[in-house]
Amino acid sequence: MARLPLNQILVGDCIQVMQGLPEGCVDMVFADPPYNLQIRQELYRPNMTVVDGVDDEWDRFQSLADYDRFTEAWLSAARRVLKDTGTLWVIGTYHNIYRIGKILMDLGFWILNDIVWVKTNPMPQFRGVRFANAHETLIWAQKVKGAKYTFNYHDMKALNDGLQMRSDWCIPICTGSERIRINREKAHSTQKPEALLYRVILSSTDAGDVVLDPFFGTGTTGAVAKRLHRNWIGIERDPRYVAVARERIDRVLPVLFEAIEPASTPVHKTKRVPFGALVENGYIAPGETLFFQAKRELQATVLANGHIRMGKEQGSIHQMGRLITGAPCNGWEHWYFYDKREGTMFPVDVLRKRFVQDMVESGHETAPENTHVEPPLLQAER
């Protein structure tokens, strides 16, 4: 197989570029294709300012038949480069997603989910003649029906504060400092929020996998893939977007590799380990102090029942993290304990992994919630 152009932006038409890549070479395709909105007149707000809509040249097609031919061509090219175990994500609005869904099914893709991205801050329907368009739809499909594919169920559950992740995702649109602007104008009219791509990539790829984006734009897919230690390939025909994407991705710093927990690790094969199991088995003692994101000014006390207390509030490590951030929080990664032996702080997830490993070494294939094991030295004894 020819060497893949990993972590590069390939300039050109996505169909032609994909046809030049080796067959079966990528693990996932994320596609944000033209929506074919066909805006034919300016739209004004009530204060008579013009709405910055999608009227770019790349979103114009002569007819629905022309759009369908384009869709079939790029989907066929994407299918060819996907591994048999690979999956495709494609996002769209009511203007195009149903046509795309029909075509991808005709090509042999098998739909796993449709995800509703609920925009928490959508653009109003200024004319007042229809419901406000407050969502977009993502289709998640596998190349071969029944084939093995990657779904990091436990990561999604942890991301959702211990609850099974649903198919309705409430995520704000791209605004504020995340929105890339050039001379105060949007660099790209349909830039997606990184939070959306974070969930897509974390859910259906593993570290080291290859993610292909045939409509790369300003590089959101590449930026998130780099953060999460995934390889990426971007295809973009507009040199202006290419320049913005390269500069953006060059500034991205990957997260610590230790924070990327592969789906094949023992934790994914064990029963859920509550924080209380660490307390009752002596891995951390009641009364010890935890530090949120290793900040000494944000402290909580470990309680005997496995909850932690901050001031008058108490709850699980996840609930208390959410109280601080105002968003779902994986407490295992955000709460730290002070290791006197090492003289530094570590996430409490270190203790969880130690507990699981001790379970395995002591002959337990799983980590039962109420099984006692010989405890390590408590922090106070180190």
Image: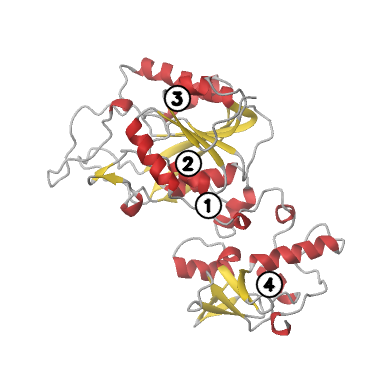
Which residue is at a point 71% across and 63% down the rendered structure image?
Answer: 353
Q: Earlier in the sequence, mark 4 or mark 2?
A: 2
Secondary structure under the numbered disc 2 in the rendered image? helix
- Coordinates of residue 136 in the picture (x, y in percent): 40, 39
Question: CA gap, disc 4 to disc 2?
Answer: 38 Å
Mark 3: amino acid: Cys
Mark 4: amino acid: Gly
- Coordinates of residue 93 in the picture (x, y in percent): 38, 34
Disc 1: which residue: 254
Question: CA gap, disc 3 to disc 1?
Answer: 27 Å
Question: CA gap, disc 4 to disc 1?
Answer: 32 Å
Look at discs 4 and 1 and give the one toward the viewer.
Answer: 1
Secondary structure under the numbered disc 3 in the rendered image? helix
Label placed on residue 333: none
Disc 3: which residue: 14
Mark 2: amino acid: Gly
Label placed on residue 222: 2
Look at discs 3 and 4 and give the one toward the viewer.
Answer: 3
**Label 3–label 1 contact, CB within 8 A:** no
Categorize mark 3 by other alpha carbons within 10 Å: few (<14), some (14-19), many (20+).
many
Secondary structure under the numbered disc 1 in the rendered image? loop
Q: Is residue 59 left or right of residue 166?
A: left
Disc 4: which residue: 276
Categorize mark 1 by other alpha carbons within 10 Å: few (<14), some (14-19), many (20+).
some
